């Protein structure tokens, strides 16, 4: 009986690995770019790989690089990435209802490995999801992200100096590329982006706040304002999000 259960767990894990292959492949270019940009930002290879190992959050890591590049303090970076990743609380709560009940340390393990992509693959699986399947999806995705971050760093080392310096522009180009499609789909996102940008500019030019604190405050205040407008529109019979 124990052998049968062990075989079943191994099968669940293999299915998870197979389910995560597409994520691992998709992470390759993003992680390579992160490693390359980390090199041009001034991080060491150890710092680069450790960030991917301990954070494992693409958007948050890219934002951290941009904040590091302008000399932002550690507290501002932590608060900014916390705000960016706050949606993970909802993802974790959702998956806890779908995954089989298990020991706390196992729950902590797959909670750490939740990204937008791993969440999607795990949540769309029919029926109750075994912990082994979740770990399979997360492990192959995590491995791809960490390994390719390191490879990207070493690719950055062999680039000419002028190319390394120019790669910092890619950070801002990537953020624009991520933002514009969302703005096209939602008036709310457009309003939020414009409000946050305008508020950040005002704070930078009218106060003595650092770049990091300016971004944190602009993000929080604009999110509250936009959400308040949406709620008021709904109460007044308005359209809401779109």
Image (cartoon, rainbow, N blue to C red):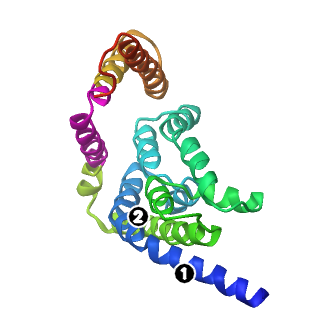
The overriding secondary structure of the stretch rendered in magenta is helix
Q: What stretch is highlighted in magenta?
A: 168-190
In the rendered image of this protein, does residue 103 appear above or below residue 41?
below
Q: Nearer the viewer, residue 98 or 92?
A: 98
Question: Which quadrant is the C terminus positioned in?
Answer: top left
| Local crowd size for mark 2, using a 10 Å CA cut-off: few (<14), some (14–19), many (≥20) | many
* Vertical arrangement, residue 82 with respect to residue 106, above or below: above
Name the front one of labels 2 and 1: 1
Tell me: 232 left or right of 73. left
Q: List the residue tagged with mark 1.
A: 14
Q: Which of marks 2 and 1 is nearer the N terminus?
A: 1
- Specify the quadrant of the image occupied by residue 188: top left
Image quadrant in which you'd find residue 231: top left
Q: Is residue 167 above or below residue 22?
A: above
- Which x, y percent locates residue 82? 55, 37
- Using the image as rendered, state which of residue 221 and residue 124 is in the foreground: 124
Q: In terms of secondary structure, where does tag 2 sit?
A: helix
x and y percentages locating residue 61 in the rendered image: 46, 49
115 is within the stretch colored magenta: no
Q: Residues within 10 Å of mark 1 (few under 14, many from 20)?
A: some
Residue 183 vs residue 14: left or right?
A: left
Circle 1: element type: helix
Write the residue at 54% across / 66% down. 138
């Amino acid at each position: 009986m124990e052998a049968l259960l062990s075989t079943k767990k191994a099968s669940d894990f293999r299915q998870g690995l197979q389910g995560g292959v597409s994520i691992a492949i998709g992470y390759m270019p993003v992680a390579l770019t992160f490693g390359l940009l980390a090199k041009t930002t001034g991080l060491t290879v150890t710092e680069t790989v450790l960030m991917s190992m301990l954070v494992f959050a693409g958007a948050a890591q890219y934002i951290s690089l941009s904040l590091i590049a302008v000399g932002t303090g550690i507290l501002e970076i932590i608060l900014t990435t916390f705000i960016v990743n706050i949606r993970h609380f909802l993802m974790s709560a959702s998956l806890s209802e779908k995954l089989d009940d298990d020991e706390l340390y196992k729950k902590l393990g797959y909670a750490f490995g939740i990204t937008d992509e791993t969440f999607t693959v795990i949540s769309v699986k029919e029926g109750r999801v075994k912990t082994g399947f979740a770990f399979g999806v997360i492990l192959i995705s995590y491995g791809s992200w960490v390994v390719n971050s390191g490879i990207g760093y070493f690719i950055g080392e062999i680039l000419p100096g002028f190319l390394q310096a120019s790669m910092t522009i890619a950070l801002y180009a990537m953020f624009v590329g991520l933002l514009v499609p969302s703005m096209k789909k939602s008036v709310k996102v457009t309003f939020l982006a414009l409000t946050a940008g305008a508020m950040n500019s005002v704070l930078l030019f009218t106060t003595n706040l650092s770049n990091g604190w300016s971004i944190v405050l602009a993000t929080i205040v604009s999110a509250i304002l936009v959400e308040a407008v949406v709620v008021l529109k709904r109460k007044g019979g308005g359209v809401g999000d779109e």
